[in-house]
Amino acid sequence: MNPKIVLVAPSDAHEPARTMLPSGFDLLIEAAGSPAYAAALREAEYLVGFVDMLVKESLYQAAPRLRLIQLLSAGYDRADIATARRAGVPIANNGGANAVAVAEHALLLMLAVSRRLIWQHASVSAGRWRGNATPRVHELRSRTLGIVGLGTIGKKTARLAAAFGMPVQYYDIARLSEDAEDALGVRFRLLRELLRTSDIVSLHVPLNPSTQGMLGAAELALMKPDAILVNTSRGPVVDEPALHRALSAGAIAGAGLDVFAEEPPPVDNPLFKLDNVVLSAHLAGPTFESNIARLRNAFDNVQRVARGEPPLWVIPELG
């Protein structure tokens, strides 16, 4: 009998998953919480999908044969890590499958805010050619980018920024060697130092107790008045009311946000009324290409475990 993979994913992933499924495995595509899902878990050896919120005691009780939980997401902030540690089943994230997509989106937000793209579009589409005024807009070249979190996505963002002629500095608890910094073209700065000296700050950290609220009122007050904040990581990394106050008061020039403290954000979120923000709906990662890469990495990891090899990309808390 073939080992069983249970997939929990949006419908647009179903057919690619069937096409990419390695031989020798059975794929069961089920909706989390359904009776069919519960039945499938009893025989499942691999759980694949956007499933970090399902990682809790009941999962391990329902799936006694589980050998790997393979996330299609990069983040895992909704998983019960303590329970996962006791269960001893490895959890792997998507192995940087969405890194290119998120890095490109971060640059998109930098450009859109710097060039006031939304304002320009609204003016032209409303018949106000140039809005009766020429706005002050900025190039990215020579503007210092400060990257907070130099993981896979942060590194790709640094490479893209270099192509725009941006000096890049970074803060990360895992500091690179000087040779590695030279190769990537980045320089380490302490967090407060980075905030004070960067023209654009881009956040690429996971959400965990050490990063929740890491940019609050005191940190935002360190930033330059003409600086831009870009967040494609997780909303709660930033104190959202403090960010709104800073943007409203002109303490910083603008923000590009793909993530929010609450998702979806309430319709009365005060950020919606500001004209110095560009917003997207937590869509930096899911491109056609990254969705295929997620499945490729997932099935590769499943095969590794089936061969008796350790999985790749196990989350640090379980590594």
Image (cartoon, grey):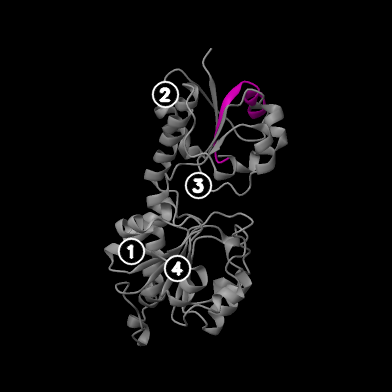
State yes or no: discs 1 and 2 in contact (Cβ < 8 Å): no
Mark 2 or mark 3: whose residue is earlier in sequence:
2
Q: Is residue 80 visible?
A: no
Which sits in the foreground, 48 or 86?
86
Above or below — where is 45 with respect to 182? above
Identify the residue under disc 2: 22
Above or below — where is 257 with respect to 245? above
Instruction: Estimate the spatial distance between the alpha carbons at disc 4 and disc 3, rounded to whole Å.
Output: 25 Å
SS state under label 4: loop
State yes or no: discs 1 and 4 in contact (Cβ < 8 Å): no
Instruction: Estimate the spatial distance between the alpha carbons at disc 2 and disc 4, rounded to whole Å.
Output: 45 Å
State yes or no: discs 2 and 3 in contact (Cβ < 8 Å): no
Above or below — where is 282 with respect to 238? above
**Magenta span of residues:** 37-51
Identify the residue under disc 3: 74
Identify the residue at horizontal 43%, vertical 36% (top origin): 297
Q: Residue furthest top?
A: 1
Instruction: Estimate the spatial distance between the alpha carbons at disc 2 and disc 3, rounded to whole Å.
Output: 22 Å
Question: Is residue 225 rendered to the left or right of residue 77?
Answer: left
Identify the residue at horizontal 32%, vertical 69% (top origin): 166
Quadrant in the rendering for residue 30:
top right
Number of residues whose C-alpha sits closer than 10 Å to that of mark 1, classed few (under 14), some (14–19) or many (20 or more): many
Identify the residue under disc 1: 161
Percent x, y of residue 51: 59, 40
